[in-house]
Amino acid sequence: MQWSHGFFSLLGIEPDSMKPSSDALSKMVHPDDRPPAEAVGRTLHEGLPAEWEFRIIRPNGRIRWISTRSELLMDSDGHPVRSIGVSFDVTKRHEVLQSLDMASGQNEALIKAAHGIVWFADRNGHITRLLRSDDTASDWSPSRQSDSWIDLVHPDEKSSFEGVWRQAALSRTSYRLEHRIRQRDSSYRWARTMIVPVSSRRGEPLELIGLSNDIENEK
């Protein structure tokens, strides 16, 4: 086995400070990420390209994510001759994915804590996504996500709601209002809705996020 100076650097050790070997590399791989023997066997016996992402524990104790892609070279008789591979440090990507997982979990927790419905809509008012904290919070149907939010509002309140919607879409100001919302059985229930605009770094409006809570009993 031969390692490039770059691979030594990925492992966090000085070039040529140790003899490259499968055992030496295996000892640095995180115990939870070591491939099963059958996976290695398939690569050797079937000549299949291998892609593997794993964590290594450097001598200083730091953990890094490594992505390795290898190819098995065969002779004219189909016998393995050698394996070549390239490795990349993908720690940053895994950190981003971990942050996204955490953000997703936090969003779900916030939605549950809100005891209502969180919806996302474009600037024209068309619902793109709808999430509810539980099945009893409301009878609004996820199947209506393609509808305009205005179409679900009671006819008597459409005009005022539409004006607030336009203001929220064009500004960075949050709005709160109370209105009646149509249910699946065509009845209406009172809800309190907070509309928050989301903008890009340059201030361009991207979407609207709303939180709606059922206040029928309060009314």
Image (cartoon, grey):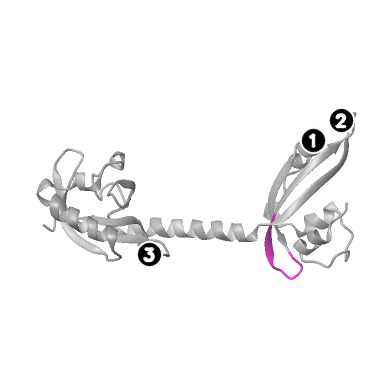
Q: Could you tell me which secondary element the residue under label 1 belongs to?
A: loop
The amino acid at mark 3 is Gly
Q: Which residue is mark 1?
A: 47
Which numbered marker is on residue 9? none
- Position of residue 93 measured from the top left corner of the image (x, y, whole percent): 60, 57
Q: Is residue 199 left or right of residue 54?
A: left
Q: CA distance from mark 2 to mark 3?
A: 61 Å
- Residue where numbered disc 3 is placed: 203
* Residue at (78, 64) in percent of width and height: 9
SS for callout 2: loop
Q: Is residue 134 magenta?
A: no
Quarter of the image with the C terminus is: bottom left
Mark sitting earlier along the chain (1/2): 1
Disc 1 marks a residue whose amino acid type is: Gly
**Number of marks drawn:** 3
Which residue is at a point 31% across and 56% down the rendered structure image? 208
Counting residues from the N terminus, which is met first, the one under dot 2 or under dot 3?
2
Give coordinates of residue 30: x percent, y percent.
70, 57
Q: Which element type, helix, strand or loop, lies under badge 3?
A: loop
| Tag 1 near tag 3, CB within 8 Å | no
Q: Nearer the viewer, mark 1 or mark 3?
A: 3
Q: Are marks 1 and 2 in contact (CB under 8 Å)?
A: yes
Give the CA distance from mark 1 to mark 3. Answer: 53 Å
Q: Residues within 10 Å of mark 2 (few under 14, many from 20)?
A: few
The answer to whether any part of residue 195 appears in the image is no
- Kindly identify which residue carries mark 2: 78
Left or right: where does residue 90 sit relative to residue 99? right
Magenta segment boundaries in residue numbering: 58-66
CB contact under 8 Å: marks 2 and 3: no
Q: Is 114 left or right of 61, judged from the image as shown?
A: left
